[in-house]
Image (cartoon, rainbow, N blue to C red):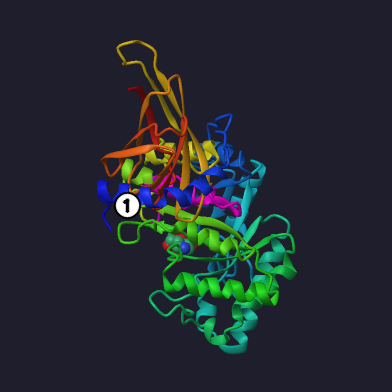
């Protein structure tokens, strides 16, 4: 729906009374204090981590390890812990490359996400041809052996990866593992819990970011079922591989929040967003904000360091360019992490353009947040005779106001004047996935 300035104003009038109550219950929020200069340190300020996928054969590249050691506090082996890497022959385990990554990370004080114990893909040749009880037992033995070997060293395991079908079914993906019986996933989780009781156990998948997609709903129902029956699951990983055909959904926060409400942690596990410049930066910002807005979103991992390290390098989907320079997307993520609230800091402007001298200051503060909207408050000082301009950024729209007389320059720009209710007014913004604070500026009428 496109809202004209007129229809926005109409909605605001209708909603003023209803929202006055919400306005009275506004929470105050103070901006984060210090600013950290690396992704990991910035994420730690809110108790979260910021990780990356690491490839063992790049650990000898000093630019690569320089960025890795400086910026990230969580590591995922991009390929080295997969089934084909760790059990190339049945019953014969191989941990050389995985150990290189785990040891490098732990020596640097970083934690490790294990990826992945059971998956229909990247199976060793011997397993691809198995079925039935033999395959089920081989899978369970693999889970037990690998999780036991790394016991105590893994923060979270992707116990099962990508077991749901794409498309509209909302059901399981067909695979040799699925054909061993629908309970293969819970069997894998129970085996992983027995082998490493200290590791968080995650289900990990892609195309599960949009709340309205059948696949998302299918995974949600499985997690709900596991929680209700006591199957040991602690977290859900959202891979978050985005591009123009699969954009960051505006309901991402809703998805993360709804899963978290089942009693699991949620993590963004393989983030990359194809694109460049400010468009890409804005999308990265939105994903980071969605995580920060959910208490149980415990961390974000990007799927590689430099664009050239990516599994889809031509889409330049990462935070550092091929030379290891920080991209605009890096800065937007760092800023959101530093702010800690999932929003960018307010812009407050004092204008002294009135002929008689003097001026005014408009100060923005956060109000309540909901899945699809949030409230903002502006307090004016310096004059009782103010004109405040509030500018929101797309796709945000202001749908209601209170304690002010509002008019509209455009759908994004509201002009607020006193209406006899004092010098603090409020409004409600439909955020459409963009949690940025509006910019506000004040002039004397
Ligand atoms: O980035 C990984 C790439 O190097 C491998 O060739 C590929 C093999 O399956 O796996 C890529 O990582 C995938 C991850 O393990 C699971 N989710 C999708 C990732 C991108 O394909």
Q: Position of residue 195 (x, y in %)?
A: 73, 68
Q: Please give the range of residues in magenta.
A: 283-311
Q: Position of residue 296 (x, y in %)?
A: 61, 54
- Asked whether, in this view, residue 222 is left or right of residue 325, the answer is right
Q: From the viewer's perspective, is residue 442 above or below residue 262?
A: above
Within 10 Å of disc 1 (Cα), the crowding (few <14, some 14-19, many 20+) is: some
Specify whether tag 1 is near ligand 1 (CB below 8 Å): no
Pick the quarter of the image with the N terminus: bottom left
Q: Which residue is more in the foreground, 9 or 429?
A: 9
Determine the secondary structure under disc 1.
helix
The part of the image, by quadrant, that contains residue 168 is: bottom left
Q: Position of residue 171 (x, y in %)?
A: 47, 80
- Asked whether, in this view, residue 441 is left or right of residue 256, the answer is left
Q: Which residue appears at 30% of the width and 57% of the height?
A: 244
Q: Quadrant of ligand 1?
A: bottom left
Pick the quarter of the image with the C terminus: top left
Q: From the viewer's perspective, is residue 92 above or below residue 444?
A: below
Q: Which residue is more in the foreground, 426 or 320?
A: 426
**Please, which residue is most extreme toward the bottom here?**
132
- The residue singled out by tag 1 in the image is 315
**Please, which residue is most extreme toward the top here?**
356
Q: Which residue is more in the foreground, 259 or 313?
A: 259
Question: Can residue 191 be seen here?
Answer: yes
Q: Position of residue 366 (x, y in %)?
A: 51, 39
Question: Can residue 115 be seen here?
Answer: no
The question of residue 255 being in magenta is answered with no
The question of residue 307 being in magenta is answered with yes
């Amino acid at each position: 729906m496109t809202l004209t300035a007129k229809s926005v104003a109409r909605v605001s009038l209708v909603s003023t009374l209803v929202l006055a109550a919400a306005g009275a219950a506004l929470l105050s929020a103070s901006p984060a204090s210090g600013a950290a200069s690396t992704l990991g340190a910035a994420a730690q300020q809110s108790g979260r981590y910021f990780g990356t996928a690491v490839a063992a054969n790049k650990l000898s590249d000093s630019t690569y390890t320089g960025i890795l050691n400086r910026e990230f506090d969580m590591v995922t082996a991009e390929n080295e812990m997969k089934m084909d890497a760790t059990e190339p022959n049945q019953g014969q385990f191989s941990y050389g490359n995985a150990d290189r990554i785990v040891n490098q990370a732990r020596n640097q004080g970083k934690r490790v996400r294990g990826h992945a114990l059971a998956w229909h893909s990247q199976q060793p040749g011997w397993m691809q041809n198995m079925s039935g009880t033999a395959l089920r037992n081989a899978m369970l033995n693999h889970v037990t052996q690998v999780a036991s070997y790394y016991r105590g060293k893994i923060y979270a395991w992707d116990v099962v990866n990508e077991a749901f079908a794409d498309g509209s079914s909302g059901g399981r993906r067909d695979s040799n593992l699925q054909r061993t019986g629908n309970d293969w996933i819970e069997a894998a989780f129970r085996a992983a819990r027995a082998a490493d009781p200290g590791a968080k156990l995650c289900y990990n998948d892609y195309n599960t970011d949009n709340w309205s997609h059948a696949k998302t709903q299918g995974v949600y129902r499985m997690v709900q079922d596991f929680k209700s029956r006591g199957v040991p699951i602690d977290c859900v990983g959202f891979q978050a591989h985005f591009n123009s055909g699969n954009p960051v959904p505006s309901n991402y926060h809703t998805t993360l929040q709804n899963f978290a409400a089942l009693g699991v942690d949620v993590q963004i596990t393989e983030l990359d967003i194809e694109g460049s410049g400010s468009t890409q930066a804005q999308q990265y910002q939105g994903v980071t904000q969605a995580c920060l807005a959910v208490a149980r979103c415990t961390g974000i991992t990007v799927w590689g360091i430099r664009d050239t390290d990516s599994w889809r390098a031509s889409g330049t989907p990462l935070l550092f360019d091929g030379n290891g320079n920080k991209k605009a997307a890096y800065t937007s993520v760092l800023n959101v992490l530093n702010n800690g609230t999932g929003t960018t800091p307010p812009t407050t402007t004092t204008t002294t353009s009135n002929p008689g001298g003097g001026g005014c200051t408009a100060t923005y503060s956060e109000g309540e947040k909901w899945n699809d909207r949030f409230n903002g408050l502006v307090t004016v000082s310096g004059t009782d005779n103010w004109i405040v301009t509030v500018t929101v950024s797309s796709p945000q729209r202001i749908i209601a106001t209170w304690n002010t007389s509002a008019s509209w320059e455009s759908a994004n720009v509201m002009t607020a004047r006193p209406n006899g209710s004092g010098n603090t007014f409020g409004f409600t913004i439909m955020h459409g996935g963009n949690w940025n604070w509006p910019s506000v500026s004040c002039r004397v009428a």
